[in-house]
Image: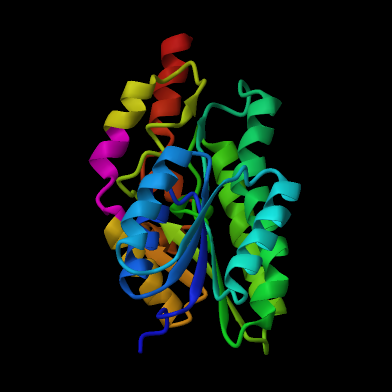
């Protein structure tokens, strides 16, 4: 029997992208699922597909930024399944703008989902996870929780925060039944950039999408496989994609100059010259 058969996994951001791919892969291995997202139509479609594979599936329209709603969701999941074995804190959004120009409202909006959503999920489900014989918390950070880009300060901040939170939690769970993993995907072919809030004046959304689509080399299904393999091996840090693995090395080799080596400042300097 594989480790997922007849277990229960909770996944946020499960209506599309990595979350949906994780749900499908786990269902194929006999794992029962509790899925959350704001896209209820996407969740309904996922539920239909998953139940056809012979496992149970609970879905809920959930705003991960709402702690009270997350606590209620956790109570519903525990009532439905009794034992909970896996928590995938996967929900996330993106914001493109400069520190100088972005609004604090937008910054708060992103942090409430990307960071506080992870904290809310962990706090809501940790008691149930600790009661299971074996359990795992899988927090999805990003390649941009390892390095930074211009115009993504809020996103970078949220993903570095997820990394810090996860690494501390991992230490606190030492000697318990709960393993903690932090996932750092590189460019994944999902809708997070298509749905990004772009308020920057120096770049258009079409330009961002063109660049992202060239660099997104990993499918959600490949990402899900890499994440589950990392969970099975109890890896504290799970790098997803060749780009994530390469850039992680570059940042560690050249911590004081990686942005120059990778050309991250070229666009900023070009834009500044054009405005002078």
Q: How many marks?
A: 0
Q: Which residues are magenta?
A: 211-220
Residue 245 visible in rendering: no
- Outermost residue, top side: 276
Q: Specify whether residue 216 is painted magenta.
A: yes
Q: Residue at x 40, y 54 (%)?
A: 47
Q: Position of residue 242 (x, y in %)?
A: 28, 61
Indicate the colouring scheme.
rainbow
| Quarter of image, res 270 | top left
- Outermost residue, right side: 68
| Residue 200 appears left or right of 117 | left
Q: Position of residue 274 (x, y in %)?
A: 41, 12
Q: Main secondary structure of the magenta part?
A: helix
Q: Position of residue 265 (x, y in %)?
A: 43, 34
Question: Toward the viewer: 30 or 94?
Answer: 30
Q: Would you place residue 236 above or below residue 61 in this image?
A: below
Q: Position of residue 237 (x, y in %)?
A: 49, 70
Residue 102 visible in rendering: yes
Question: Toward the viewer: 64 or 271?
Answer: 64
Q: Quadrant of the N terminus?
A: bottom left
Q: Residue at x 42, y 73 (%)?
A: 31
| Residue 212 appears left or right of 134 | left
| Residue 218 appears left or right of 146 | left
Q: Residue at x 63, y 55 (%)?
A: 118
| Quarter of image, res 83 | bottom right
Q: Specify whether residue 272 is painted magenta.
A: no
Question: Toward the viewer: 221 or 163?
Answer: 221
Q: Would you place residue 60 above or below residue 41 in this image?
A: below
| Quarter of image, res 193 | top left
């Amino acid at each position: 029997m594989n480790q997922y058969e007849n277990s229960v996994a909770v996944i946020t951001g499960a209506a599309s992208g990595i979350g949906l791919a994780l749900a499908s892969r786990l269902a194929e291995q006999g794992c029962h699922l509790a899925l959350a997202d704001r896209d209820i139509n996407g969740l309904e479609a996922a539920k239909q597909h998953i139940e056809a594979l012979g496992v149970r599936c609970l879905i809920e329209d959930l705003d991960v930024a709402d702690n009270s709603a997350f606590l209620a969701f956790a109570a519903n999941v525990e009532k439905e399944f009794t034992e909970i074995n896996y928590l995938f804190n996967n929900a996330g959004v993106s914001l493109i703008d400069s520190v100088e120009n972005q609004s604090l409202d937008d910054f708060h909006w992103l942090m409430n989902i990307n960071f506080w959503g992870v904290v809310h999920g962990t706090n809501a489900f940790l008691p149930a996870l600790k009661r299971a014989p074996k359990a795992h918390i899988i927090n999805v950070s990003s390649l941009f929780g390892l390095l930074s880009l211009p115009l993504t300060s809020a996103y970078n901040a949220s993903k570095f925060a997820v990394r810090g939170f996860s690494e501390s939690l991992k230490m606190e769970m030492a000697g318990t039944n709960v393993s903690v993993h932090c996932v750092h995907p590189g460019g994944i072919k999902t809708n997070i950039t298509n749905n990004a809030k772009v308020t920057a004046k120096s770049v258009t959304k079409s330009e961002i999408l063109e660049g992202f689509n060239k660099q997104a080399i990993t499918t959600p299904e490949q990402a899900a496989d890499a994440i589950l393999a990392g969970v099975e091996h109890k890896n504290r840090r799970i790098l997803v994609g060749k780009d994530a693995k390469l850039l992680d090395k570059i940042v560690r080799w050249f911590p004081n100059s990686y942005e120059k080596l990778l050309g991250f400042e070229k666009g900023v300097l070009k834009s500044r010259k054009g405005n002078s």
